[in-house]
Amino acid sequence: MTVGRNWIHLAGVIWPLLTEAGSAGETLTYTKVAPTIATNPLSVGLALGPIQTYCMENRLPPLTAVVVGKNSGMPGGGFVAWDVDDLAAALSAVAAYNWELIGNPFAGFGAEDTEDTFAEALIDDPGNAVDVYHRVRDRGMAQRIFRRALLLAYDERCAFCGLAFPDALEAAHIVPWSSCEPAQRLDVRNGVLLCASHHRLFDRNIMWLQDNFLITYYDPEEKDGRYRKVDRAFTIALHGSNIRLPKDPTHHPDSANLRRRLALAAK
Ligand SMILES: [Zn+2]
């Protein structure tokens, strides 16, 4: 039975096997890896998935190329990180890389930890952001966790316009990821849930937030051209109104972060 297994945690369990074999220029079979995570060879790919994604997102050699079929000697169908016709080059790249440099990126995921439990930890106490940040090493995963936390905090609505399609909602950082302290990167008080369009306008500082949570638009008096009704509704009509704040005041944006953003934008 494979349902309910924590594949990210299991990715962390097999990571050292893969880096050890890969550094030695060796391959492992699915049959050999499967028992180390108490699964069957066909399900090993589910634990390889997060590793493959991590390597691709971080431009690392394709570590999962070291796991091959017993008879075929080739990675399975889920392997997309490299041209399988040139497996030898993939394995050389893996062997040449010093995997000790980055350590096991999934080591922070205990058997009970998932992206959802980390998101809940950020909501239970925004002060958990530092701990979660250090345990979740993959930036893509960290961003997904941050978004999930903001979806919870903002009740799945855009803080500007109230749009409620979860697929269109994104996590916006107030002090940008690149400018903030690690402790703030996953702190819900340094984020706001916005629809994709408002996120873009916010990122470009075309719309921003005052430190008292008032939405501000750069051209409230329509001096910069004529507006269509829908454009006005999305921008000018919101100027001077309050954002939809999270119900729980401990999740509200931190005014100091809002001031810091305005200062950075003014530079
Ligand atoms: Zn919106």
Image (cartoon, rainbow, N blue to C red):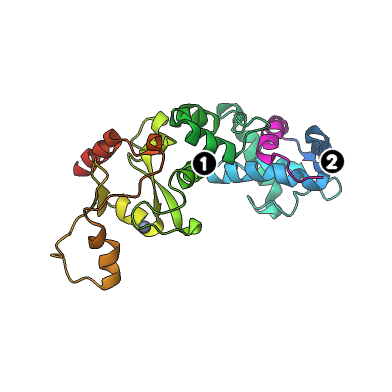
Question: Splitting the image into four quadrants, where does ligand 1 fall?
Answer: bottom left
Queried whether the magenta region covers residue 14, the answer comes back as yes
Queried whether the magenta region covers residue 7, the answer comes back as yes
If the image is split into quadrants, where does the C terminus sit? Answer: top left
If the image is split into quadrants, where does the N terminus sit? Answer: top right
Disc tally is 2
Question: With 187 as the anchor, is 141 left or right in this view?
Answer: right
Which contiguous range is marked in magenta? Answer: 1-25
The residue sitting at 79% across, 33% down in the picture is 36
Q: Position of residue 237 (x, y in %)?
A: 24, 62
Q: Nearer the viewer, mark 2 or mark 1?
A: 1
Front-most of 260 and 59? 260
Badge 2 element: helix
Counting residues from the N terminus, which is met first, the one under dot 2 or under dot 1? 2
Question: Is residue 22 at least partly visible in the picture?
Answer: no
Badge 1 element: helix
The residue sitting at 22% across, 70% down in the picture is 227
Q: Position of residue 80 (x, y in %)?
A: 65, 53
Question: With 124 as the anchor, is 158 left or right in this view?
Answer: left
Front-most of 111 and 236? 236
Front-most of 156 and 201? 156
Q: Position of residue 197 (x, y in %)?
A: 36, 59
For residue 31, the mark is 2
Q: The disc labelled 2 sits on which kind of residue?
A: Thr
Residue pointed to by mark 1? 145
On whether ligand 1 comes within 8 Å of the CB at mark 2, the answer is no
Disc 2 packing (10 Å; few <14; some 14–19; many ≥20): some
